[in-house]
Amino acid sequence: MERRNQADTITATVTSMAGAADTAKTNIKVSMFATCIGDALYPRIGEAMARLLARLGVSLEFPPGQTCCGQPAFNSGYWEEARRSASTLLEAFADSDFVIGPSGSCIGMIHHYPKLFEHDPVRLKMAEELKAKSYEFTQFLVQVLGVTDLGASFPHKVTYHPSCHGSRLLGIKEEPMALLQNVKGMELIPLPFAEDCCGFGGTFAVKMADISGAMVTEKADHVLETSAEVLTGLDMACLMNIAGQLRHRQQSVRVMHLAELLDEGVSGT
Amino acid sequence: MSSVKERADLALNNDFLRKAVRFTTERLRDGKRKAADDHGNWEEWRERGRQIRLHTIAHLDYYLHRFAEQARANGAHVHFASTGEEAVRIALEIAARKQARSVVKSKSMVSEELHVNRALEEAGVETVETDLGEYIIQLAGEAPSHIIIPAIHKNRYQIAELLSREAGEELPPETSVLAGFVRRKLRAKFLEADIGMTGCNFAIAETGSIVLFENEGNARMVSTVPKTQITFMGMERIIPSWSDLEVMATLLPRSATGQKLTVYMSGITGPRRSADGDGPEEMHIIILDNGRSEQLGDPEFQELLNCIRCGACLNACPVYRHIGGHAYGGTYSGPIGAVLTPALNKNVAEWDDIASASSLCGACYEACPVKIPLHDMLVYLRRRKVEQGYGNKLETAGMKGFAAVTANSKRFHQVLKAGRVLQRLVVRNGEIPAQIGPLKGWNRYRVAPSLANQPFRERWDSLQHELRASVEQTGTGAVAQERMREALLQRAAARPEGNGVPGRTHEVSGDQDGNATVRKEGQTYDG
Amino acid sequence: MMDNEYYEWLKTKEAEARQKQEQFMDRIAGKLKRPRQREAPAHPFRGAPAYWRELDWSLEERLARFEENFTAAGGHVVRLANFEAAKAYIAAMAQTLGARYILRQDDPLLAELGVDEVLTAEGARVSVWNGHRSEAWITRAAEADFGIVAADYAVAYTGSLVVRSAPEKGRSVSLLPTALFAIVPVDRLKTRLGEVLETFDKAGREALPAGIHFISGPSRSADIENDLTIGVHGPGVVFALLVG
């Protein structure tokens, strides 16, 4: 994957930003893509993300016209239905400069939009534009803002699950690692077979419930092997899947989106 | 025919099978990772491999024709078969003309596609698989469950039992004893066989040669000892030159088993020369279409023809890992099988069955040495099934409902509100444990979360006020603004070529004359 | 068997195949939505990446890497100063392993080695493969304890021996005996696979033998419970004798 920012910028920190005094009003429009799961089930993630960005001087706006990226329909082959849902994003973010979402999978879905709208010239153009300005949360922090140290401290044992779509299809591998490594007091324990899929796969988990069940069971086994107190990641759908299995086994591992973990780490709660 | 779900259930309940498949695929994928790291610049080699395959397929009429002419010039007899039945008919005819009583075969996935063993046996020709794993599953009357390790699903006790029956005496379940028995037994078969049958890993257009990769030496036996050789070859197996073979020989063994090269790599150019003391006197090459040409010119599936049959996608696949090869129900298993089987057979009604058995995690694409976007193809298969009206009725209704709700944010919000009320019936301590309705399968393994009391969109107003104040207070926004402005400039500068887009690969544009570029922008990404 | 009727049948099949071949090519062109490609297309991606073609190890490194790779695959590598030493080594191994029958290729280099006399003197039988003479060569090879070949090339990067077939150089000699000895004069040891493969492109179709075999260790299989076993069909013991 081509990185637009060089490694030297990755070391920039919040501290170095604090010196800047120019608070001139700007017209750069940064939009929050809450994702349907984030909106309906886990609003705390969108809140954490907005708070962290506010600390860095980025104020988000939330276009309420957005619903869902359309991935459940797209992946199941129902592209007409996917287009209806995807269109809400095309329109909601039409005049945004940056769109930031807390999910590699949903942002990855936006990367499929040009294919999804290939026969609709008007929407195809909107799709190309949206794709160009959409960022997964850690991508935006590291690649655009050049921030890897938020000054967070989180004195716990943590393990990280790299979700497939973010890590494989968008190439987001170093960004979350860089952010995690700068969290003070935290012990980061490598997750065995980390890159194996957790078995979520959207409707796959419903249609092929037993195969999906075998996959998530194995993933939870690996999480438990680390004896970490907290499991973190970049995709709440996968984390919901693993958390559900851990709860089913009455395990008390806390499952947090990385944005939540960092927010808690900086606000000291 | 049973469904993929039923077959998967069988596998999920077979403890040995699951452990054996896990162990083997882990061994192979670790081997691959090490081999790729040792070799270095793996991405560049993958891209090279992909380009060679794209180029060859884009000019397949030239290269295949060239291969056939050159193979004839070498003294081989070349045949073309549109279907599996035709290929089998040609092979049977040769066997009959040669009055053959026995055939020895080396491992060939194409011949599995044809079920040629059955046809030969019915014609009264003894047919012996000589690859150790293939021989074992032939004795068991089964099909291979892995492209590279066909008997992955059998343990040593089962193997000892099968071989003991063949030996007429009790053989101990020790690998060396069992392999020793097979060596002696098959040595005799090689020496008396009338025909040797092989597959073909690569065919070199420029010299009309075929190339075989193997570790046991049985493919060499089959192509050295019997007087007649029949080689089955998929029409897409071509590469232009021996120089291109260096790339394939670098990618194939490393991706398959982690080896730098298989123990034997044999280039066979025609039958024996007149004064040679061994090698077949007569060589037949049967070139098979069997659904392959259907993929040509199809922008979504043409790259399937790039496959070099290494099995790396099986080893990387978390679904294969749990259900093994037989659950896929076709000759080819794993991610490649899930796409190839429906694509070759054009069996629309069954498309979704096998294409559904994937979480679309993309591990197959990442593992593929020629970068075939299998995870995208699975989605295209599902879409084609729906477009042609074979969608599952319940699912279709569900998706229509999904679209009705998500096409409009006000309706979406209303549904969230209604759901919040309705879920009170099932929520316990903020979770939904009951195995009911759509949560039946999910909650067999998990506890479902409940809808938030207040969705994000309802919290936004107050959150926004709180954050606006904090941004103004901190006054740290200048650097961030500067960085964002920079990113916007870079984006604008990159736009004319359609490149430099966030998180996207710079896709090499395929063949220079354009017609090999079947992959359109946005269809895949580099990790 | 090879009667007129059979040849007539072959001719009929060839005519059928040629017709079918045209259909195949027309279908391919049709599917690709363009006219038939009849001229060789420009092939901009031929062979390995450019950087790779520059890889060229010193002799010492080639020797070391060949040994490392060939040994890792389960083969044996012995470095010997000259033919005299190679001869002595083979004779000693014949003694140790109790070889009674040895088959070698009719290669001038092996004749020069003079191994026949010393093996015969110790009571073993030696045959020299030559397709020009009538003999059940394959059966002889299957009976042999040792096969001795001169490698045409060796490749350090993959740890491979390369043998080409010829009337004097049966494919069976490196395949059917229990143990294989390959003499490799060190100047035949290349760095990369491509250095050898490119010679076949340069030579062209007519110059190629029926069989070109790359051998990277003993025959092996892991088909029974992933348990590695050696010598399944081909030689289980393989020696590369690097001479010079």
Image (cartoon, coloured by chain):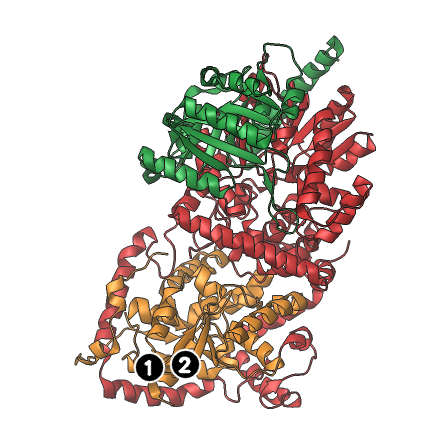
Residue A60 seen in render: yes
Image colour assigned to chain B: red
- For badge 1, the amino acid type reads Ala
The chain displayed green equals: C
Rendering colour (chain A): orange
Give the structural element (helix, strand or loop) at label 2: helix
Q: Which residue is mark 1?
A: A152
Task: Estimate the spatial distance between the alpha carbons at disc 1 and disc 2, rounded to whole Å.
Answer: 9 Å
Q: Quadrant of residue C232?
A: top right
Residue at 57% of width from left, 69% of height from top?
A200
Q: Nearer the viewer, residue B40 or A47?
A: B40
Residue B298 lies, in percent from the top left, at: 55, 44
Residue A212 position (above or below residue B333): below
State yes or no: discs 1 and 2 in contact (Cβ < 8 Å): yes
Residue B340: x %, y % from top left: 61, 47
The residue tagged 2 is A261
Residue occupying image coordinates x 68% and y 83%: B434
**Residue B58 seen in the current view:** no
Q: Is residue B428 above or below residue B145?
A: below
